[in-house]
């Protein structure tokens, strides 16, 4: 059986390490889909503000990507992380020094990141299989509580990212996935 691996590239791994040292307070996206009766948000990308350094704003942008194996055409989804000077899909208003908002903005409890788990998804066909980096579970802790959020890339053809923040929803979106890498304690 031919095995394929779709892993984070070096830049994404560096950004994931940077993310593990951040105090994440907001997740932003230029789009959002929510079904009635669920608390899972489906977005095209996620922008996480890091604040300003040397007078420039910085953001971590997480995007999903789709692919398929060459013979059996097994569809898979993975993601990448990049540091940018602007959130993805937002317009900047120079007069007010702010970004125009008609998007999703999830405010999180303050607290530093304690762990990041990189999740792997497997797909198996008759002649091929693929393992891809397709999710993150970010754990943050304040003085009293621990708070988890899952970011999971899914498809099948068009890669989107599910954001889950309740234990039930995190279990639902990460079902069948395994932890490949853990950063933090």
Image: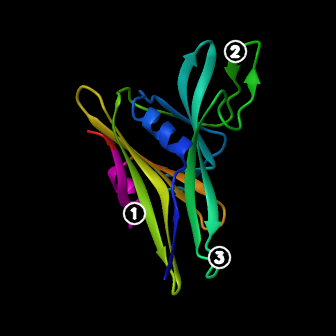
Q: Which residue is mark 1?
A: 177
The quadrant the C terminus occupies is: top left
- Helix, strand or loop at mark 2: loop
Upstream in sequence: badge 3 or badge 1: 3
Which residue occupies 45% across, 64% down? 121
Q: Decide which of 83, 30 is in the foreground and name it.
A: 83
Question: Does the image show residue 173?
Answer: no
In the image, which residues are magenta? 166-182
Please tell me the numbered disc located at residue 19: none
Q: Residue furthest left?
A: 144
Which residue occupies 62% across, 56% down? 65
Q: CA distance from mark 3 to mark 1?
A: 23 Å
**Mark 3 packing: few (<14 Cα in 10 Å), some, or many (20+)?**
few
**Mark 1 packing: few (<14 Cα in 10 Å), some, or many (20+)?**
some
- The image shows residue 77, relative to residue 55, as above or below, that is below
Q: CA distance from mark 3 to mark 2?
A: 47 Å
- The image shows residue 28, relative to residue 41, as above or below, that is above
**Residue 170 pos. (x, y %):** 38, 54
Q: Residue furthest bottom?
A: 126
**Residue 173 pos. (x, y %):** 43, 59
Q: Which residue is mark 3?
A: 70
Q: Which residue is mark 2?
A: 97
Which residue occupies 55% across, 41% down? 11
Q: Is residue 145 left or right of residue 140?
A: left
Upstream in sequence: badge 2 or badge 1: 2
- Helix, strand or loop at mark 3: loop
| Quarter location, residue 176 | bottom left
Which residue occupies 61% across, 45% down? 45
Q: Is 169 within the magenta?
A: yes
Upstream in sequence: badge 3 or badge 2: 3
**Callout 3–callout 1 Cβ contact below 8 Å:** no
Tag in front: 3 or 2: 3
């Amino acid at each position: 059986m031919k095995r394929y691996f779709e892993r984070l590239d070096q830049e994404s791994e560096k950004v994931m390490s940077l993310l593990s040292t951040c105090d994440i307070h907001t997740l932003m996206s230029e789009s959002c889909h929510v079904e009635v009766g669920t608390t899972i948000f489906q977005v095209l990308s996620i922008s996480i503000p890091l604040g300003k350094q040397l007078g420039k704003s910085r953001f971590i942008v997480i995007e999903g990507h789709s692919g398929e194996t060459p013979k059996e055409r097994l569809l898979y989804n993975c993601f990448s992380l990049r540091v940018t000077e602007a959130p993805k899909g937002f317009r900047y208003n120079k007069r007010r020094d702010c970004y125009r908002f008609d998007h999703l903005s999830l405010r999180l409890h303050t607290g530093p990141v304690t762990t990041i788990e990189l999740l792997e998804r497997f797909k198996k066909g008759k002649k091929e299989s693929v393992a891809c980096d397709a999710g993150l579970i970010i754990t943050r802790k304040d003085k009293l509580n621990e708070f988890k959020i899952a970011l999971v890339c899914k498809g099948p053809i068009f890669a989107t990212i599910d954001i889950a923040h309740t234990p039930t929803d995190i279990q639902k979106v990460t079902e069948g996935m395994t932890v490949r890498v853990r950063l933090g304690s």
